[in-house]
Image: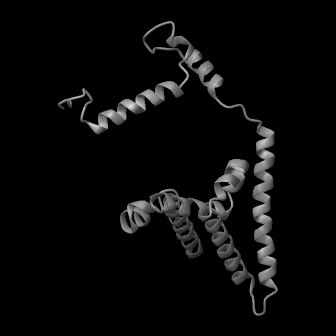
Amino acid sequence: MAASGDGIREDPGGICLLLFARIFEFRIKKPPWAAERDEMKVDKQEYQLWVEELSPQTNLWWGCLKAFLVGGLICLLGQCIHEYVMTLPDMTEKTAAAWTSISLIFLGAFVTGVGWYDNIGHFAGAGSIIPITGFANGIVSSAIEFKKEGFILGLGAKMFTIAGPVIVYGVLASSVCGLIYWVVQLL
């Protein structure tokens, strides 16, 4: 590519790559062996020590407690919704379970839409993604991320990037279980 009059390349991709390399260079701590030699050949022990040095230290028990409490609070909310719905007239257990699931999915999608679910997930870790609200968060967060690409190629195509495999394997597993149940009933 030809250079412009002031010596700057006219390739915007190359300039972006150069800027990215500069930013990346300043943010990454060089490994201890990089100062000693030019090549990046290391053994497993050196690499493992470097990874342990750079990895954030976490308190496993505190993280488990937070995940348990937040996941438990989400499930408690679901149980409260279920108990309230059961008090409504002409409500069966099956219908109440459906309304509970619908309510939790709506709440998970709403909390994701207003931007609170990321904070909950950062605090609670896996405690926020295991209940059904985490499934709603997976779908809505993908939809929010790709909405700028349009309704068809963005929102429609990318909405199920996280939750799609869960749906596919859930349907596949339930079909296989149903087929096995049917065959056993025939015998």
The answer to whether residue 25 is above or below residue 171 is above
Residue 130: quadrant of the picture: bottom right
Farthest residue to the top: give it.
36
**How many marks are shown on the rendered structure?**
0
Q: Position of residue 103 (x, y in %)?
A: 68, 75
The answer to whether residue 177 is above or below residue 7 is below
Q: Position of residue 55 (x, y in %)?
A: 64, 29
The residue located at (61%, 67%) in the rendering is 109
Q: Position of residue 47 (x, y in %)?
A: 56, 19
The residue located at (47%, 63%) in the rendering is 159
Farthest residue to the front: give it.
6
The C terminus: image quadrant: bottom right
Residue 97: quadrant of the picture: bottom right
Rendering colour mode: one colour
The residue located at (72%, 48%) in the rendering is 123
Q: Position of residue 38 (x, y in %)?
A: 43, 10
In the rendered structure, the answer to whether residue 102 lies left or right of residue 9 reads right
In the rendered structure, the answer to whether residue 4 lies left or right of residue 34 reads left
The answer to whether residue 11 is above or below residue 102 is above
The N terminus: image quadrant: top left
In the rendered structure, the answer to whether residue 63 lies left or right of residue 109 reads right
Farthest residue to the bottom: give it.
90
